[in-house]
Amino acid sequence: MSDIAVRNKQNPILSTEMLKSSDALMIIECLLNPGVFKFNGKTWLLVRVAERTVQDEGSLSVPIYNENGKVEILNFDLKDPSLEASDARVITYDGVDYLTTISHLRLVSSTDGIHFSEDESYPSLFGEGAYESYGIEDCRVAQIDDIYYLTYTMVSPNGVGVGLRTTKDWKTFERKGMIFSPHNKDCAIFEEKINGKYYALHRPSSPQLGGNYIWLAESPDAVHWGNHKCIAKTRQGKFDSKRLGAGAAPIKTKKGWLEIYHGATEKNRYCLGALLLDLDDPTKLIARSEAPIMEPIAAYEKNGFFGNVVFTNGHRVDGDTITMYYGASDQYVCMAEFSIEDILQTLGQ
């Protein structure tokens, strides 16, 4: 087995019963992979909280966000022939798809990096407007100087794209809108400019020709992106044979930019691998994991809302140690540590 993660003995460190639902009509279904950052001497997680509605007998209700970021409940008669509800995650009514859960982003903080709690003076982030009506998901946080860049998945009937918000104090946010149009997700901005430009990893999807690959883009302002290049593709017979996508912001090492990414098979088993990119030209791939550095082997990773999943988009770095916060089985938030040197050795570096 190739797994080199050192899991925290207190995993899972966050579960549904540890947080309150956002609304009396909602129930927290699961917690998922958080963005991670340091602020005011604490470790903070921006956790994806997926909620569902309280169901009434004989009907099926789904939540959406309105233009003001408030939850509205849509109710459908289970006997209505226009309703297709065989999938527990997505239903279709009269040709329109709806999610059975809706996600927002919740801030929690910790002084020891293990025990987290909410501070009500820091607001949760909800979907707003037509392009976020089905929620916002899977936020990555990158800090450049005193600005935090939040890249996240915007979900709506129009498709799945990448949104950007920025903040300096985590109480006021500037909305930049959609920076990568559908279908796109898994966007991680590098935490420093390279040759005067911002860089970001992202994952467009091409179901007809191509696939779910990691791409690199550059920008003069972190809002307008171009010069896209594909840097990593799926590989038949390996842990990333069906899809792959970036985790958190790449880590700068002496050997190159180290990116921990997720890869999935046709059977939807999610593992973590690593890429190494050139320091001066991140379009150049130096090395890539042949085997995963982390696999779903713990009980809480194999069993849950959607089992056999380890998925990350957030970490802290202290010297050689990466403290990673990750989602397990689409239900829990957990923590594990890696040695940067150990990861580089798996890459032959």
Image (tube, rainbow, N blue to C red):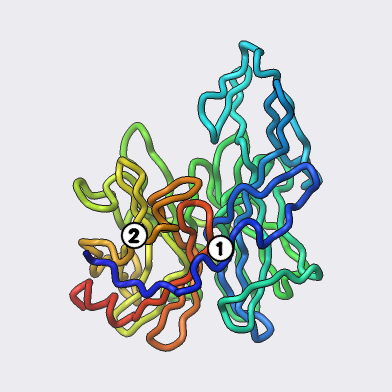
Q: Where is residue 40 in the image (x, y as percent from the top left)?
A: 69, 84
State the quadrant of the N terminus: bottom left
Task: Give the residue furthest to the bottom.
Answer: 319
The quadrant holding residue 17 is bottom right
Residue type (three-letter) at the residue carrying disc 2:
Ile
Which secondary structure lies at badge 2?
loop
Q: Residues within 10 Å of mark 1 (few under 14, many from 20)?
A: many
Number of labelled discs?
2
* Residue type at the position of mark 1: Pro
Specify which label sits upstream in the sequence, 2 or 1: 1
Q: What residue would you read off at disc 2?
A: 297
Measured as percent of width and height from the top left, residue 285 is found at 27, 65
**Residue neighbourhood size for the residue with mark 2, other residues' Cα within 10 Å, grouped as few (<14), some (14–19), many (≥20):** some
Using the rendered view, name the quadrant where residue 82 is placed.
Answer: top right
Marks 2, 1: nearer the viewer: 2
Tag shown at residue 34: 1
Residue that appears at 44% across and 58% down: 300
Question: Quadrant location of the C terminus?
Answer: bottom left
Q: Which residue is drawn at 46% across and 86% down?
A: 318
195 w.r.t. 70: above or below: below
Q: Which of 48 and 303 is in front in this view?
A: 303
Question: Of 198 and 39, which appears nearest the observer?
Answer: 39
Tell me the CA gap for discs 2 and 1: 20 Å
Inspect this view and state whether residue 348 appears. Answer: yes
The secondary element bearing badge 1 is classed as strand
Please state if 234 lies on the left or on the right of 8 as rendered. left
